[in-house]
Amino acid sequence: MLGSSAVGKTSLVRHYVDGIFSEKYLTTLGVKIDKKQLTVKDKQFQFLLWDIEGTDQYAAFQPRYIRGASALILVTDCTRIQTYIDAVDIFKQARQLTDVPIVLVINKTDLNKHWQLEEQTLLDHQHDFIEVIYTSAKTGTSVEQLFQSIGEYFVKHL
Amino acid sequence: MSNIYNESSNNSLEKMALNALDCTVLLRRQSEKFEIIHQIETWSNIVISKISAHKAVINDGCIFLNDFLIDAEMFWAKNQQGVLSSGFWTEQLANGKLMHFEALACVTEQQSLLIINNVQSVFAQQQKTLQIAREALISNEQLAQQVDNTHQYLNEIATNTDDMKKMLATIASTIEHATFGIMLLDKNLKPILQNPINYQLFQVNTKDQGQTETPLDVIFKLMKKQYPEHERIFEAASAWHGELYWLAAPYYVKWLKVSIYPIKGALGDVNHWVFYISDITRIKHLLEHNEQLAHYDSLTKLPNRQLFWNLLEQNCSQQPAFYLLYLDIDNFKFINESYGHAEGDELLITIAQRLQKMLKKEDIICRVGGDEFVILLRNIKEEDAKKHCLAIAQRILRKINEPYEVRHKDRIITTASIGIVHFPTDATDPDLLMKYSDLAAYNAKLTGKSNIKFYSQKLQQKTAQRIALENALREAIVNHEFSIVLQPMMDINTGKIIKAEALVRWLPPNAENNIMPNDFIPLAEDTGLIIPLGKLIFKQVCQCIQQLNQQGHPLTVSVNLSPKQIYDNSLSHFVYQMLNEYNIPPQQIEFEITESSLANDFDLVLATLLQLKKGGVNIAVDDFGTGYSSLAYLKRLPVDSLKIDRSFIKDIENDENDKAIVSAVIVMAHSLKLSVIAEGVENIAQLDFLSKMNCDIIQGYFFSKPLYLNNFISFIKKHNENLT
């Protein structure tokens, strides 16, 4: 799970693994790894979800953490355009290190504020990702679908 | 000590120390197998499994630590003394409790160690600090985004609507519902509209007409005290962003974030000012929980503006002299917009690091604004102090000029301008020192990029004169105080006048003499006034051509295009609209561009020229030989002729180098199928030489000075009569 700080990476994991959401923002330091089993078309997957500290001026992108990753989930916050700009930057850095599938997540869709981002800008980058998913860790919207889509990708491609 | 304690008591001391540090220490015996040196029984089983009394492996379930072992093995293999950290990671226990660890791979005395620290308390402390910093960062980011969006909207409406009532009706709702204070002011800084939030921010009752201090009064009062350089913002019509500390004892203590923007009309003149004010007291309060964050800029880690003021005041109260250097990055906004904010931030960090490396320990460097740094140079030897200071400033500029590699391997080149003021010679008061250094930096920027200016009283007068001239120029455009003069160009072979260059003269009302282009065109170019002025001149040129045509003299007239005009998107459309309006064939226009225009952004210049050329106008390269010449560029440009600069013609009778250059240029131009115009021809010897070298056209006082239209027509008539 990659992205700027406070985009909701931990909340997405908490919702998916434990089915809970907390309104209180608690910043992640370093890494926390969670496990979750998933079955897609009779195939069993074990997700090892690396919830990584958000990238910002206090914490740089750590290439070491994505070594060995099977897929990357790049999370943005739909209320903060800067998180999308940061995501494009993280994407470019990650792509220099790995060619694993990447999903772009646009989180916090429950909040009634959106980017002033032209659809075209998003479309220009859409082909970089195996999927672009709009989620809300708060309401749970598309959280299951996010991980399910990664499972389906592996069923199809492996 | 060794006399007091025996070996066993030493061991027990080490054990006590390791227990106190809460760490488990493993000695690497072979790949992924360790000898236990010390373990904390209460938690070590979370990360390691014993395989015998003293041997252990890392738990399979401890995924992060197993992953770190890959790096650790590589590190140990090098067998070089040092430490490699894993960074923090978190393990969740079966009961839900979270434990935080950090692993260190060490090599000491040829031994490979793996130390696993329980970092519970350090983690909590760092999490608290970062939590505060990140919350503040996000609040700031959201606030800036809201202000940006609102300003874009207001600016668009205010710029494009002439009708004040209509404009206010359109923007009223946006202003009313904004979550921060907004004040719309007229060009004289008189409030037109303020929103309720603004009154609330300043604890002002909107119905209380007797209120002695308005929100604007408060802002100006605070700016005057805290940002002595602020006056220049209004004089020079610049945008400004800053934070103001408001202590209205005993009731309020507030931090206000203020952004001020001029709203300019088509002529670049200020029609309105808009102020955005946000209460950032909470953000500041969060930051002040951590002294480091409160006094240091979180991006560059340099002292911030608040700490800088303390340091400046301290230095002013002590007597040793110092220089204050105000360093402003040139075109930082452009870099941010072109490469993105992340790259802009990276650039600022690198600049800060470069500056720090260049300065002595006793010097002080702070980041006092978005792209502004201040340096206090202390302990400069009194002898030749100014010379030393200049040398340091020049070194700084050279260092800043070195290319920057940003994340995507792009190389950015940037420059900076430096204004310098001396304590105590120029001022002894911190406010004045800042004001004067800012003024000097502003002047350094005006004289071009990468410049240094020392403050002087003369500089202050010069700034005032420049601002007055800029205002007069703006008025002059509105009042059409410009005239066109035409200087004939003669075909050397036929002796006929085939072209004329249009030049502009400015005659202000009540002035005795014209103001020559060299005295106002550079200013117009700097301030952007060249766009409306250029359009006005072109319209007047079209009127001249129309009259020439009506009187049977359908000449081609050349018009100068400045670099800013070439970058103006509306240029081509305007040109052909005018030609259409005055019924002028496009072949009767020749645009002269200078070589310096080509050097800036060749592809953009090429696109503009191709668009112009497509419509049928001619293009000439002016002042050829004085700037950045590239034959490769010339070949690609849709150019019809070259004008050899007058500096090569001046001494052509005697100077062998000039002769060689001019001959070579003529041959080269002809081989590229370009015609050649020699300007500044003043005598028969020059004409003879140019004629021998097959130059096509001449222009200069030998033939005729620039003439007003009526005189020009008379001149042509007389010239033609002589020819026949």
Image (spheres, grey):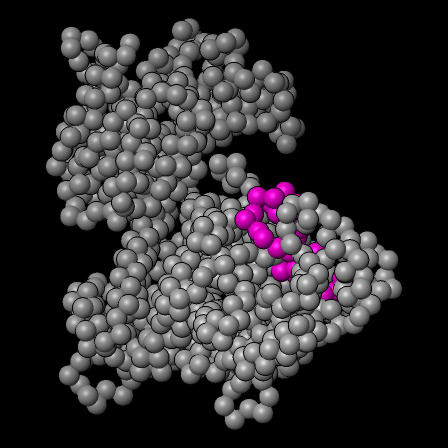
Q: Is residue B191 left or right of residue B125?
A: left
Tell whether position B290 is magenta.
Answer: no
Q: Residue at x 49, y 38 (%)?
A: B407
Question: Is B202 placed above or below B57 here?
Answer: below
Q: List x then y, in percent, for residue A146.
A: 20, 26
| Residue under the image location 41 percent in, 32 percent down | A92
Instruction: State the residue in front, B41 or B118.
Output: B118
Quadrant location of residue B168? bottom left
- Which residue occupies the foreground of this view, B716 or A116? B716
Q: Residue at x 24, y 20 (%)?
A: A150
Q: Which residues are magenta?
A: B622-648
Whether residue B639 appears in magenta in the rendering, the answer is: yes
Q: Position of residue A44 (x, y in %)?
A: 20, 10
Q: Going by the image, does B612 lie left or right of B263?
A: right
Residue at point 30% right, 60% down?
Answer: B152
Quadrant for residue B583, please give it. bottom left
**Residue B403 in the image: above or below residue B444:** above
